[in-house]
Amino acid sequence: MIFNWLSWFPVVGTAILMYFARVSHIAVLHYNLFLALLLAWCAAVIAFYRVFNAPGERNGATGRKKL
């Protein structure tokens, strides 16, 4: 049950960060910083889901759990 909620944390975090970017106008004022932060966030989300979806639980290349 906890794993179902844990997988939604990056989605909620992305929504919060995009709201912050809109309110603070960081994408307009500091475009290079915004792109660097966006790349770092994408790398963190990819790493999170790679760790969250451990290789021992994968079924081939599909990433689906075995029944």
Image (cartoon, rainbow, N blue to C red):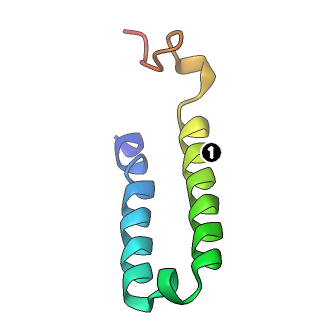
Give residue 14's quadrant in the image.
bottom left
In this rendering, the answer to whether 49 lies above or below 5 is above
Q: Quadrant of the N terminus?
A: top left
Which residue: 36% across, 78% down?
A: 19
User: Is 25 on the left-hand or right-hand side of 42?
Assistant: left
Q: Residue at x 65, y 68 (%)?
A: 36
Q: Secondary structure at mark 1?
A: helix
Residue where numbered disc 1 is placed: 47
Rendering quarter of residue 67: top left
Q: Name above or below for residue 45 compared with residue 49.
A: below
Which is nearer the eye, 26 or 28?
28
Residue 63 vs residue 41, the one in the foreground: 41
Residue drawn at (46%, 16%) of the image: 62
Residue 11 coordinates in the image, percent (x, y): 38, 56
Where in the figure is residue 5, as x and y percent of width and height?
35, 49
Q: Position of residue 45 (x, y in %)?
A: 54, 51
Does 61 sit left or right of 66 as displayed?
Answer: right
Q: How many marks?
A: 1
Residue 53 to residue 55: above or below: below
Quarter of image, res 55 = top right
Query: Residue type at mark 1?
Result: Ala
Residue at 53%, 9% (x, y): give it. Answer: 60
Disc 1 residue crowd, few under 14, some 14–19, many 20+, Cα 10 Å = few
Residue 66 locus on image (x, y percent):
42, 10
